[in-house]
Every structure is written in C-alpha cells, then in structure tokens.
Image (spheres, rainbow, N blue to C red):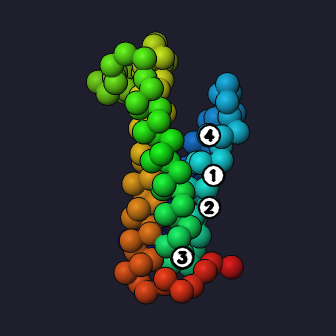
Amino acid sequence: MILRVASAVMGVLFLVCVALQYNDPDPLQWMAIYGAGALVSLAHARRGRVHPALPIVVAVAAVVWGLYIATHIHGAFEWHHLAESMHAGTPQIEESRESLGLFIVAAWMAVVALSGARAGTSGRVIS
C-alpha cells in the first residue's frame, strides 16, 4: 500500500515536471520522458503492479540520456549549485539539473520494476 501511494505521489510530481517543460527550449523530449515516468507510476499506483518491462524501458532511456548529458557538460558537474535558486546561472548548472532529473526518473522506475518483479508479474501486461 505504501508503494502504491508513493507511486501516486511520484506520478503527480512527474506530471508537474511535464507542465514545467512548456517553456523549455526543447520541451517535447522532456515532456515525453517525464510523461512516461508519470504514466508508469500512475498505472502502478492504480493497479499495484505493472509489467517490469515498462519501467525498465523508461529507466534505460533516462539513464542513457542522463549519462550522455553528464558526460558532455562543458566544465565541472555543479551539484552544489543545484538548489540555490530556480535560475540556472550557467549551462553547467542547467545540464547538471537535467541529468539529475533523468536519474530521478530512472531510480523511481527501478523501484517500480523491482516491485513488479517481486510480485511475480513478469508475465502480466497492464491493459
């Protein structure tokens, strides 16, 4: 029950992330990854399980994309500036935040996938 509530909360948070991408220079790809995370999370919250392949696909996409961004940051990875203000003062801060967001999606999808695998849903697909 706790995991279903957490999935609902994460699903809503991912939907907020989708809405926040509206003003981004490249909104569609960000809306897609956060939207996929939201859909998987909300399906998990509603049903208590999803086929583990769904969150795994989202997690792999988020990790690959996040690693790509993290390894192509011009300058140092700036973790210590991530929460100072909403304004991304440098490209490094924005890229650091972007990769962190992708890693959050991936981490939550891993939790959902593991919960589905432990529940024995490897042969079930959400409909």
Question: Residue beneath label 2, please?
Answer: 39
- Kindly indicate the quadrant of the structure image that contains residue 46: bottom right
Q: Which residue lies furthest to the left in this view?
A: 80
Question: Residue beneath label 3, please?
Answer: 51
Residue drawn at point x = 42 percent, y = 39 percent: 67
Marks 2 and 3 close (CB-CB < 8 Å): no
Quadrant occupied by the N terminus = bottom left
**Callout 4 secondary element:** helix
Q: Where is residue 42 in the image (x, y as percent from the top left)?
A: 58, 65
- Asked if one can make out residue 101 in the rendered structure from this viewpoint, the answer is no
Quadrant occupied by the C terminus = bottom right
Marks 2 and 1 close (CB-CB < 8 Å): yes
Residue drawn at point x = 32 percent, y = 27 percent: 79
Mark 4 Cα within 10 Å, few/some/many (few <14, many 20+)? many
**Disc 4/disc 1 C-alpha distance (Å):** 8 Å
**Is 127 placed above or below 105 here?**
below
Q: What residue type is labelled 1?
A: Gly
